[in-house]
Image (cartoon, rainbow, N blue to C red):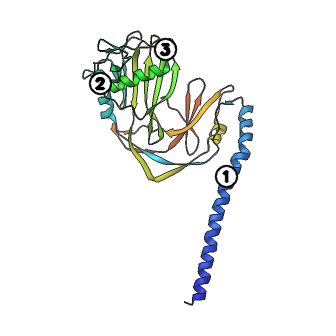
Amino acid sequence: MEWGKVKSILIVLFLMLNAVLAANIVNQYLDRRVGDDFREDIDQIIEKRGITLECELPVEKYEVRRLIYEDNSDMARELATRLAGEDLIGVKFTGPESFTYTSGAQQDELGFEHADNSPLDEPGSVREGGALQVGFDIEDDENLDATARAMFWQAGIDMSEFIIDKILYDISGGKIIKYIRKYEGELIFDSNIKVFFNPAGDIYSIHVNSRGVRGFSEEVKMQMIPAYQVVLRNAFQEGQVIRAIDVGYLGQEGEQDGAFTESMEGAVWRIKLDDGNDRYFEGVYGNEIIYVV
């Protein structure tokens, strides 16, 4: 083949490549412009529906990895044993990977065996007589969190991947701290722990959901529907306040004929309301998922 023809073909290929790159740049620019142009209009539409936004409403498109869930029932039983002992007194399994551990009465606190070199042995310890004595001011969230983490440390449970998701008052004047797992920077909504404090600041109950996670699939990814479309497509009561919108993972039940089956799940949108409730929506189509964490 003559060099002139080769050169002509190369020039055409380079022109085609430049056209593709230019189109991608233009599309990205238009996506950003659509976000800038529509954000104010979307906020006004939502406001007319009687919904208040206390957070920024994401308008961008997201591409996320899928998360692989696996059986974690053995770990759930091990966690319960570490907290309550081999006899599991006070433990009730509410599912293959979830359980509650309670003292039986709100005024009673959960007792724990003394463990040497615990954070509770540091100056200002909250331990007396080998048992966990909390008794903090119920308004002192920092100390409540520190006490809960020290309790788990004492039971040999790693809390390094768990962050505070919310702190709520219960009807008695006590408080509930809900922790959620943050795995490789992503929120796992159905891997969570709730710690219940009575009004005196004593821990009287613990609820654990310990969904098993194998890891992310790098090969299989999904494009998420923008969050503003989720809000516009679904019904919200007039007067509701949206405090936060975030992305995370929520696995479906992975059991079939009594045996756990591995599942690979996509991300979901979570909308946090001012009344303490959360609503979850499919990441692809935006349909609501009924799930009580």
In the structure shown, which secondary structural element does the residue marked by tag 3 occupy?
loop
Q: Which callout, 2 or 1, points to the residue nearer the camera?
A: 2
> For this view, does 34 lie left or right of residue 158?
right
Dot label at residue 226: none
User: Image quadrant for the N terminus?
Assistant: bottom right
Residue 236 spot, x, y in % from top left = 65, 30
Q: In this view, does 30 lie above or below 70?
A: below
| Residue ID for mark 1 | 31
Dot label at residue 117: 2
In the structure shown, which secondary structural element does the residue marked by tag 2 occupy?
loop
Q: Do the residues labelled 2 and 3 touch (CB within 8 Å)?
A: no
In the structure shown, which secondary structural element does the residue marked by tag 1 occupy?
helix
Q: Tell me which amino acid carries mark 1.
A: Asp
Q: Nearer the viewer, residue 28 or 118?
A: 118
Residue 263 spot, x, y in % from top left = 41, 44
Q: Which callout, 3 or 1, points to the residue nearer the camera?
A: 3
Dot label at residue 138: 3
